Image (tube, helix red, strand yellow):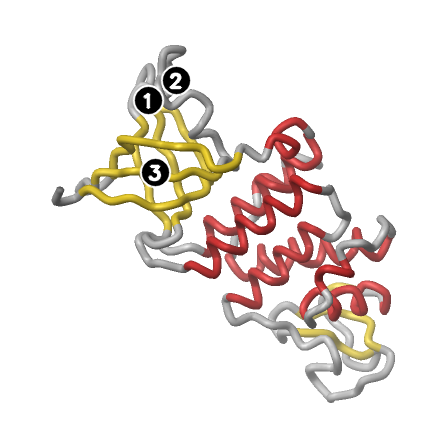
Amino acid sequence: MPGLYRDKAVVIRAIKLGESDRILTLLTEAHGKVRAVAKGVRKTTSRFGARLEPTTHVAVQLYEGRELDTITQAEALDHFSAVRADLHRWGRATTMLEAAEHIAQEREPNPPLYRMVVGALRSLDGEDAPLVLAGFLWKLLSLEGYHPQLNECVTCGSREDLVAMDFDGGGVLCRSDRRGTAVSGEAIALMRRLLGGDLVTALREPASAATAEAEALAVATVEHHVERRLRAVRTQL
């Protein structure tokens, strides 16, 4: 049928519409970011039930509209129940989704981003690892072409005494050229591992001042990149 299509998606955001409907923002595998109406979803008798809540991974059928598409079928692929039952994991998940929403473009397919989001939610659902949010955000930035220089000072090229992060400069700075945000050597080492192919083992790192620092720097870098604050992070403070 003209205008009818199927896809897989993660529900990124939901806002109320009228008395019983919702407008959903979906990150789809083949159609990019899509905004769609789920009619009657807030009724207790809704055939969609809890399948269209934020963080849910779904297979959907939609009818393409002029401004908003309409969801006609939805089948849950994964509810990520552990994420939804844990306030801390939920906060991290919604931060991931908000960052992905800012990066994704309307109706521009980005399968790597979709796979990253699904993979991060699965990882978070399996274990609330200290570096799971930082790992996702740094990988997200790298996917968008912002891969920070972490091995040498972006001003002079020195590999010694790296003590700061300059968001505009795109990487770390030595003590002589320091400006921006202070960063420890331990946090730099963790960020190198997250971006250098050692993500799986880095996720086994226990919580520490360095893991918290790597996460805070990842959030700050994303906020600088998208030029807005991540609301999900602020609600956790």
Task: Measuring from the top left, give residue 25's x and y in whole percent.
Answer: 39, 40
Element at label 3 = strand
How far separated are the C-alphas under marks 1 and 3?
17 Å
Q: Quadrant of the C terminus?
A: top right
Kindly indicate the quadrant of the structure image that contains residue 189: bottom right
Q: Amino acid at mark 3?
A: Val
Q: Amino acid at mark 1?
A: Asp
Q: Is residue 16 left or right of residue 70?
A: right
Residue at x 84%, y 57% (from the top left corner): 210
N-terminal of the pair, mark 2 or mark 1, is 1
Q: Is residue 157 left or right of residue 111?
A: right
Compare residues 26 and 45 and report the one nearer the observer: 45
Question: Which residue, given by chain and number where applicable, does mark 1 sit on?
Answer: 21
N-terminal of the pair, mark 1 or mark 3, is 1
Categorize mark 2 by other alpha carbons within 10 Å: few (<14), some (14-19), many (20+): some
Marks 2 and 1 in Cβ contact (< 8 Å): yes
On residue 42, which mark appears?
A: 2
Question: Which residue, given by chain and number where applicable, does mark 3 sit on?
Answer: 60
Residue at x 64%, y 68% (from the top left corner): 167
Q: Amino acid at mark 2?
A: Arg
N-terminal of the pair, mark 2 or mark 3, is 2
Q: Is residue 105 left or right of residue 208?
A: left
Element at label 1 = strand
Task: Measuring from the top left, give residue 182's x and y in whole percent.
Answer: 79, 64
**Residue positioned most to the top:** 44
How far separated are the C-alphas under marks 2 and 1?
6 Å
**Residue positioned most to the left:** 2
Q: Nearer the viewer, mark 2 or mark 3?
A: 3
